[in-house]
Amino acid sequence: MTTNPSWDPAQYLRHAGHRARPFADLLARLPDLPGDPPRVADLGCGPGNLTAVLAGRLPAARVTGYDSSPQMLADAEAYAGARLDFAYADLTTWTPDETYDLLVSNAALQWVPGHLDAFPAWLDGLAPGGAFAFQVPYNIDAPLHALMRELGNTPRWKPRLGSVLRHEDSVHAPGVYLDRLARLGCTADVWTTTYQHVLRGEDPVLDWVKGTGLRPALDALADDPEARDAFVTEYRDLLREAYPSAEYGTVLPFRRLFAVARKGEPTV
């Protein structure tokens, strides 16, 4: 599975309102932070629009957004300011080099294989009483992804796509996250929510996934535009059947997993 696909900020932001809602729901559950002012890291900040929302939610905090995409970081710089900056980081290897009061990650960990194994080092860089909050898509079994994998594993496409698409283990069950965080000394709240996004326009579900889950396939076929267009057309037809349109738009049910973990105070 590819861990660092190319990103198109403009395509990603075409559904910015829908994508922002889970982040707002995550921020609503943040506890009080120990630092004064708090030090905050946004892991996988993308184009920076939601990192700016985070900075607005914590106006006294010093916030750094980290991402591995040069395209995303270039767009994010438009939001930089006195207390908000952005920097390159590959989450597969990143570890804190200073103490943070809040680590937050929005729809990024699904791109980080073995991210559970990164939690100990990340939490080591968190102040006592600090929080680690994240949300990830929890819909890898939904038609949106299942149809992509099924098509990618057909004889025509498997040689080029069979190893690049996200697999079922890219996100774990809620209880797995709760157990891991609790065993690392955190008090954790883990939950799921299914959003019923009403999308508009022509083939809006395809348009949605072109900004996220389809990126690895588009990258793998980038050197063969004819093949790329053929794959997208086949996938589009499957999505049209799975997500029929109505007069008011096309409904995309989208389940997400949330976790807010608070690090315990050190034992005396």
Image: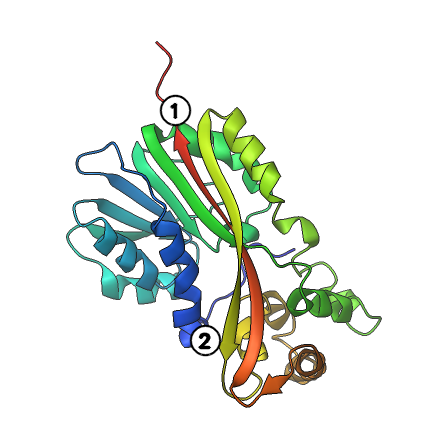
Q: Which residue is mark 1?
A: 264
Q: Is residue 185 above or below residue 122?
A: above
Q: How many marks?
A: 2
For the point 27% across and 36% down, the residue is: 33
Q: Specify few, some or many for label 1: CA neighbours under 10 Å numbering under 14, 14-19, or 20 or more.
A: some
Among all residues in the image, which is located at the extreme top?
Answer: 268
Percent x, y of residue 126: 35, 31
- Marks 2 and 1: in contact by CB < 8 Å? no
Return the mark for residue 205.
Answer: none
Position of the N terminus by quadrant? bottom right
Please indicate, yes or no, whether residue 26 appears anywhere in the rendered image.
yes
**Mark in the foreground, 1 or 2:** 1
Residue 48 visible in the displayed image: no
Mark 2 element type: helix
Residue 30: x and y in percent read 34, 43
Mark 1 vs 2, N-terminal side: 2
Query: Image quarter for residue 106?
Result: bottom left
Q: Disc 2 marks which amino acid?
A: Gln
Task: Tell me residue 229's x, y (percent).
Answer: 65, 84
Q: Is residue 123 left or right of residue 148?
A: left
The color scheme shown is: rainbow
Relative to 148, residue 40 above or below = above
- Front residue (pair 72, 237): 237
Q: What is the quadrant of the C terminus in the image?
A: top left
Q: Secondary structure at mark 1?
A: loop
Q: Position of residue 108 (x, y in %)?
A: 48, 53
Q: Nearer the viewer, residue 28 or 66?
A: 28
Whole-number angstrom distance, CA of label 1 to CA of label 2: 40 Å
**Residue type marked 1:** Gly
Residue at horizontal 67%, vertical 48%? 169
Q: For the point 49% across and 84% down, which residue is it?
A: 200
Q: Which mark is residue 11?
A: 2
